Image (cartoon, helix red, strand yellow):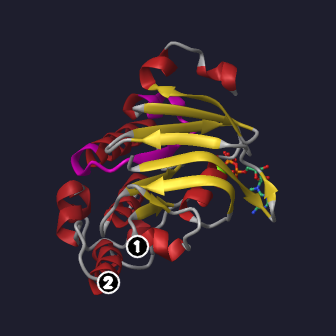
Amino acid sequence: MPLSATNLIAGYGGKPVLEKVSFTLDDGDILAFFGHNGAGKSTTLKAVLGLIDTIDGEITLNGERIEKMSVDQRLERGIKLLPEGRGVFPDLSVKENIDVVDAANRAKGSQSISASDVYDLLPVLAERRSSIAGELSGGQQQMLALGIALLGTPKCLLLEEPSVGLQPDLVEELFAKISEVCKDLRVPAILIEHKIVSAMKIADQVMIINSGRLVFNGSKAEAEKIDLWDYF
Ligand SMILES: Nc1ncnc2c1ncn2[C@@H]1O[C@H](COP(=O)(O)OP(=O)(O)OP(=O)(O)O)[C@@H](O)[C@H]1O
Ligand SMILES: [Mg+2]
């Protein structure tokens, strides 16, 4: 399995927040991850990336156990985070934003997604190549943040509320792009979202967390048969 967690327990200062969270993701799958404020969504992503320690349980990326690895080791293995808020340098141009990360990746050796691949995947960035990132619209800045996250050799995308601050039509556009990129590159993604209806359109799997416990984990078809709101 490209990404899986088994009975994952993690939290802060040795105190667990997550109670035995388990999931598995196939190539190109999008896992929509829902839950109320403070339920444990960001904590789950932090544990996958290694920003907090795993207290117990396993995390596996492409067959390799990663739960004891450093953040750097996990980044090297292709875990990519699209952080909450816009992960761009606002004073640099689109091209400079992309080139900084592209150059750092190239210095490290082989990479599968280069700057020119990002322009092909997200043509709006090619059109706005010389614009200052901070002067782009919110939707364009999110596309840029997504483009930056894709650079290198992505093996798994962790997307933290990419729709924040976007008007509905831009949310649909961004999600359609996320779906296209995941399927094209066969990269799985965890998509934390509060915009449930939009996220459901591109989800392959759905997971709902409530006070650190998974209360629903199933396919999109299974999720469509229930009232998701009952689980919040
Ligand atoms: N740095 C921290 N130190 C201690 N406790 C934390 C820390 N960050 C989060 N928590 C606690 O962990 C629990 C889960 O928080 P988390 O940030 O994972 O929620 P979330 O599902 O991402 O919520 P939201 O939708 O508001 O972003 C909460 O009870 C929160 O108070
Ligand atoms: Mg959060």
The reply to whether dot 1 and dot 2 touch (C-beta < 8 Å) is yes
Q: Write down the region rendered in magenta.
A: 183-200
Q: Amino acid at mark 2?
A: Lys
Label 2, residues with CA under 10 Å away: few <14, some 14-19, many ≥20: few
Front residue (pair 185, 168): 185
Q: SS class of the residue under badge 1?
A: helix
Earlier sequence position, callout 1 versus callout 2: 1
Q: Which residue occupies 24% across, 70% down?
A: 129
Q: Is residue 82 left or right of residue 128?
A: right
Q: Which residue is mark 1?
A: 76
Residue 182, percent from left and from top: 31, 47
Q: Which residue is mark 2?
A: 108
Q: Which residue occupies 55% across, 57% down?
A: 48
Q: Quadrant of residue 171?
A: top left
Q: Which residue occupies 26% across, 43% down?
A: 183
Which residue occupies the extreme bottom position in the image?
A: 107
Assign the C terminus to one quadrant of the image.
top right
